[in-house]
Image (tube, coloured by chain):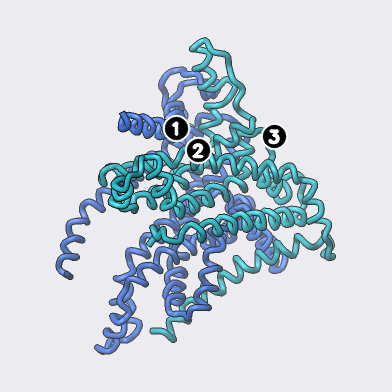
């Protein structure tokens, strides 16, 4: 009885979480001339056709991916360096650094966005730049991705045996080589996790981009203007494509993890 | 390693000063000056005009947080008691909707809640009267709960799954009934998860401006909408906008301070988190 209740509750909660997404997907195939979101008029792929003919959407998609790649790589390099630096600091400077790092994560996004907008507008006026755009978007994205990279690299550094690096140097390895041969492989999982997080956060970000983009369109900003201006099942088609892409990505990651697991476990046994 | 690796964080320090510290100082500067750059308290004083908007934001945000906790806790508890394999599937299913852009998820609710939307169509097909749902405060709360409930479920789950079953068994052996076990053992031990869940839902909910715009129509203005209007909207006034942002930050800091107080008090002897 208790178990049935638990099952029912789980089912209802997941229905709540997935019903709207399901509705979006179903109505992306709706054949309608009025663009209705609730009257079913038969199956059609016309909204997909329209979507792929929409030059603005494709442009926004390109911008989004470009920004995400640059922001992910930039924040990963800066963040990894920062994590190594923070790890070797004394207690008080480390605490200060960690507080500054945590700040953007607890600060409301809208305040971060607004404050960066003030900075960029100020900089444009001071330096005589053109206007906000790709440059300010990339800087903003690196800024909000950095804490996530640092917080995923730091635990790996903490787990690492600090003597390894010194042992490599004692054996005659120059510091830079010792870093790449000894430290980097140890913390690589944390770096990769941080980079993936940065990439997805950047793709998904709306609020901070909204305030720092000027006239440049990213996908979330374009979606926002679509929901404001017109009601079109094109948005549904776009959601379906994006959702499909995420599903495929997650499946690939899962399959890779399953494949990798045995070898990883073997390695663990060897080291034991 | 120590001496030269400290220098590695220098670029990050410079970056954070330019893109976090300076912008925050700018918000402070704008909040305390007028258009010509003269010092003034007028911006902060005129924030008082909008106290109804602030109260509405806090009220709706708090309501959404409580609802997320009440709805999310049982689910997190159920998931935590499943087999390990089922757990990872369930956690994945909880996270999956978050991978869809939140604008799209909110848009989906628009088509469900509209006056001619799916829910109303279903109601009239069943012969029931139509309900007006879109552009109400209830729709805004629903949108908040829907968008942010995964942030409540996940930290709760990760705390609940770490509770040693033998602790619960011990309580049962000592004669506690189910209710007592939950109130005296499980609930106190899940406090850290509740606190991070509450903050992770409350902060974005209280400062949102999209959900209120899309689901609340024009009549349910929130703090986020006010800020948006001062920076990118019709009422362009970055000085007032900065003052509102500053007040919003202070409110959130106070709320988090209160929550952390809770944490310290309850965590004694709990020790669930690593």
Tell me what hue chain B is rendered in.
Answer: cyan
B130 or B272: nearer the eye?
A: B272
Assign a secondary structure to mark 3: loop
* Residue underneath mark 2: B146
x, y percentage for residue A4? 31, 29
Label 2 secondary element: helix
Which chain is painted in blue? A
CB atoms at circles 2 and 1 under 8 Å apart? yes
Residue found at x 84% / y 62%: B40
Q: Earlier in the sequence, mark 3 or mark 2?
A: 2
Q: Residues within 10 Å of mark 3 (few under 14, many from 20)?
A: few
Q: Position of residue A75 (x, y in %)?
A: 47, 65
- Res B66 → quadrant: top right
Q: Are marks 3 and 2 on the same chain?
A: yes
Instruction: Name the quadrant containing residue A15.
Output: top left
Mark 3 lies on residue: B218
The C terminus of chain A lies in quadrant: bottom left
Residue occupying image coordinates x 43% and y 42%:
B73
Does residue B246 appear to the left or right of A225 in the view shown? right
Give the foreground label among 3 and 2: 2
Element class at badge 1: helix
Protein chain holding label 1: A
Q: Which mark is residue A16?
A: 1
Residue depicted at x 43% and y 45% = B183
């Amino acid at each position: 009885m208790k178990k049935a209740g638990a099952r029912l509750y789980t089912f209802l909660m997941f229905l709540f979480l997935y019903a709207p997404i399901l509705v979006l997907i179903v109505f992306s195939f709706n054949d309608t001339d009025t663009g209705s979101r609730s009257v079913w008029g038969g199956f059609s792929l016309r909204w997909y056709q329209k979507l792929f003919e929409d030059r603005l959407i494709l442009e926004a998609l390109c911008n989004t991916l470009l920004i995400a790649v640059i922001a992910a790589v930039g924040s990963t390099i800066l963040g990894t360096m920062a994590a190594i630096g923070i790890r070797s600091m004394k207690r008080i400077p480390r605490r200060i650094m960690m507080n500054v790092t945590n700040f953007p994560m607890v600060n409301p996004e809208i305040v971060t966005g607004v404050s960066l907008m003030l900075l960029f507008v100020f900089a444009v006026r001071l330096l005589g730049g053109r206007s906000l755009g790709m440059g300010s978007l990339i800087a903003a994205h690196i800024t909000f991705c950095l804490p996530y990279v640092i917080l995923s690299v730091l635990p790996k550094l903490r787990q690492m045996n600090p003597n390894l690096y010194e042992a490599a140097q004692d054996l005659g390895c120059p510091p830079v080589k010792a870093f790449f041969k000894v430290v980097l492989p140890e913390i690589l999982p944390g770096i990769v996790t941080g980079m993936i997080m940065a990439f997805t956060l950047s793709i998904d970000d709306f609020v901070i981009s909204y305030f720092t983009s000027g006239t440049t369109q990213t996908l979330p900003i374009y979606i926002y203007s679509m929901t404001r201006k017109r009601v079109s099942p094109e948005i549904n088609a776009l959601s379906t494509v994006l959702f499909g892409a995420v599903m495929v990505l997650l499946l690939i990651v899962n399959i890779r993890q399953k494949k990798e697991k045995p070898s990883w476990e073997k390695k663990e046994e060897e080291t034991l | 390693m120590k001496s030269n690796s400290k220098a590695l964080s220098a670029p990050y320090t410079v970056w954070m000063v330019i893109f976090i510290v300076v912008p925050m100082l700018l918000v402070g500067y704008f909040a305390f000056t007028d258009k010509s750059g003269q010092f003034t308290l007028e911006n902060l004083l005129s924030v008082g005009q909008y106290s109804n908007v602030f109260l509405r934001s806090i009220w709706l945000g708090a309501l959404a947080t409580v609802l997320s906790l009440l709805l999310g806790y049982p689910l997190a508890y159920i998931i935590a008691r499943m087999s390990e394999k089922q757990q990872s599937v369930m956690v994945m299913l909880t996270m999956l909707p978050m991978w869809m852009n939140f604008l799209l998820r909110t848009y989906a609710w628009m088509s469900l809640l509209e006056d001619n939307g799916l829910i109303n169509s279903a109601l009239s097909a069943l012969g029931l009267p139509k309900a007006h749902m879109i552009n109400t405060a209830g729709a805004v709360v629903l949108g908040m709960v829907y968008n942010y409930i995964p942030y409540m479920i996940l930290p709760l789950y990760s705390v609940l799954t770490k509770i040693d079953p033998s602790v619960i068994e011990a309580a049962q052996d000592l004669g506690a009934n189910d209710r007592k076990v939950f109130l005296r053992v499980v609930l106190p031990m899940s406090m850290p998860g509740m606190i991070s869940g509450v903050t992770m839902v409350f902060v974005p909910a209280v400062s949102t401006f999209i959900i209120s715009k899309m689901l609340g129509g024009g009549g349910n203005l929130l703090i986020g909408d006010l800020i948006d209007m001062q920076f990118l909207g019709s009422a362009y006034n970055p000085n007032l906008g900065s003052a509102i942002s500053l007040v919003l930050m202070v409110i959130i800091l106070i709320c988090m301070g209160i929550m952390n107080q809770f944490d310290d008090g309850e965590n004694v002897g709990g020790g669930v988190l690593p």
